[in-house]
Image: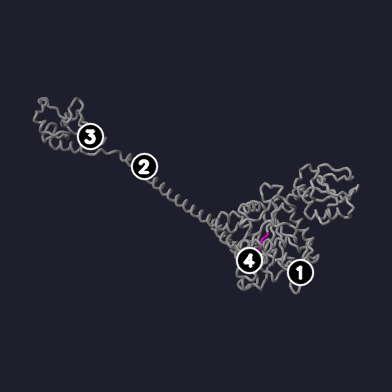
Amino acid sequence: MVYWFNIVMRDKKKPDGLNKRPASIDGIVSGGRRLGVPISHSYSPNRGDQTPTLDAFTRRSDGFHATRQSPGGLGGTAAEAAEREAILDEPIVLDELDYDKRKDKVRGRIRRARLRKTLKRITLSLLILLLAGGLYLGAKFYITQRHLFRGGGRAPALASDVDISQLKGEGDGRVNILLLGIGGPGHDGPDLTDTILLASIDPINNKIALLSIPRDLWVKIPGDGYQKINAAYPYGKQQSKAKNLIDKERAGLDLLDRTLEPVIGVPIHYHAVVDFTAFQQAVDAVGGVDVNVPEQLYDPTIAWENNYNSIIAQKGLQHMNGHKALLYAKSRETSSDFARGERQRLILVALKDKILSAGTFANPVRISSLLDSFGSNVYTDFSRSDLSRVYQITSKVRSNAIVSLDLVTPPHNLLTTGNINGLSIVEPRAGLFEYDDMKSYVRNALRDGFIAKENAQVAIYNATTTAGLATTTATTLKSYGYNVTTVQNATNATNPLATTIVDLSKGVDKYTRHYLEQRFGVAAVSKLPSSFGISPPLGTAFVIILGQDARPSN
């Protein structure tokens, strides 16, 4: 276009005879002009067409030859011919605006391609880092879990779908975990259980209760005579003939269970043994815990461990690191063993909140530190699936719904301090080894989840000649959490040999029926016998007619 414009504008300045017919840029001229003939804008009538001779063809080489105007030739001077030739040699120039747009588009495509390439590299690097971190944590967890999750414990109620045939007796409707704190290597009496805490979970009604057992409770240890209960675990380990540490630990826990279960009256399903090092590191791993201290704790006996400050903790909400939490939990010289148990429960609840918080489980660094704090410093008889189920249950329970139990606060002040041969001990108020009141309180406080949920009304009738049998039986059943509403003698006492259980719930309260059948060793019937002259109150779900087999010892 530029070329065309230049030709036209220049030719306007020439004589009229030269402005008749412009030539195209490729040498093609309208009106039948031949290709290769020099362009001329003049007309000469006296000249005829020049017929080329044979010599002209032989002297010219093959191929295309640019047209040239010899100086002084047709159509103008030599200068004009040179000017026209220079114009033909000029490159065709496109519109500058279109050119810039195309250039910007090319640059944009290059920039986008580079950006995509950079993003791919960054994404790939992040994936590699995440994969490496996941593999590291996975390997660490695998190594730790082999030591930490050894299995061996079992609670029927922990299953999401409970098999009723697996419930052996009242109490199996809860998950009871015995938490033990020991000094560990480097401490005097490294295996003495300074902390004995029963964490009881009701998975049916989503409740948790914590019960502290005084370490100085005077008990009978099977095979070892009479001693404080904190000696049962190390005695069991020392007496074990096992060659490996794991079996020794299991032997120690077995002896402790056989010592403690007759005292508290509930089964123990799982155990966790944690030494001071693991406890302190676990608290630090989750970033410390927040504890609402009920009153100032003053203990000069451990001030040297607290920068020579006798005030271990001020009253009010306190943030504690691992070291501070350990001092708060183990201090006992300036307060009672019972007060120490309460402090331990406070820290345990605070630690539970922190571990189960989203911030802990979403932070790989804290998870790694938490795993590091366990290792060989913790022993449990959980399986991985067991602990996963415990987590699912406990995460549903709010901390303010966790009940703290003790055995010294009225009206349940069942323990007191005593002295045996100059040794300070804790014993039942009812007398040495008199644990009936303790068992009744603990069983009711840790009521079986299925019995609590059904809460079926039970009527008891004595059809024997044994006076007070119905009352004695009712006391026992109440201690297990049964809802006993009626205690009477049968109108027509026939002194039957066997006890009769009548299920009036029409099979609705199946767990209560299962427990009663196991306790009395008979199958329930659905129809009330008329021969005893019994008319239970409206709403009664079960009627128990006692026979001679229902002795007080049952």
Which residue in the structure is indicated by mark 1? 417
Q: Amino acid at mark 3?
A: Met
Q: CA distance from mark 1 to mark 2?
A: 91 Å
Tell me if label 4 and label 3 are in contact, CB under 8 Å: no
**Quadrant of the image occupied by residue 301:** bottom right
Task: Give the CA separation, mark 1 to mark 4.
Answer: 25 Å
- Determine which quarter of the picture holds residue 324: bottom right
Sequence-earlier tag: 3 or 1: 3
In the rendered image, residue 419, in percent from the top left (x then y), is placed at 76, 72
Q: Nearer the viewer, residue 239 or 517?
A: 239
Give the left or right position of residue 525, taking residue 372 as reference. Answer: right
Tell which circle, 4 or 3, labels the residue nearer the N-terminal end: 3
Q: Is residue 323 left or right of residue 63?
A: right
The circle drawn on residue 326 is 4
If you read the primary sequence from the N terminus, does the residue marked by circle 4 or circle 2 appear first?
A: 2
The kind of secondary structure the magenta stretch mainly shows is strand
Q: Where is residue 483? Give x, y as percent.
A: 80, 51
**What residue type is disc 4 on?**
Leu
> Where 107 falls versus 43 (above or below)?
below
Magenta-colored span: 178-182
Is residue 377 visible to us here? yes
Q: What amino acid is at disc 1? A: Thr
Seen at 25% across and 38% down, the residue is 92
Residue designated by label 2: 105
Query: CB atoms at circles 2 and 3 under 8 Å apart?
Result: no
Residue hosting label 3: 9
Graded by Cα atoms within 10 Å as few (under 14), some (14 to 19) or many (20 or more), the crowding at tag 4 reads some
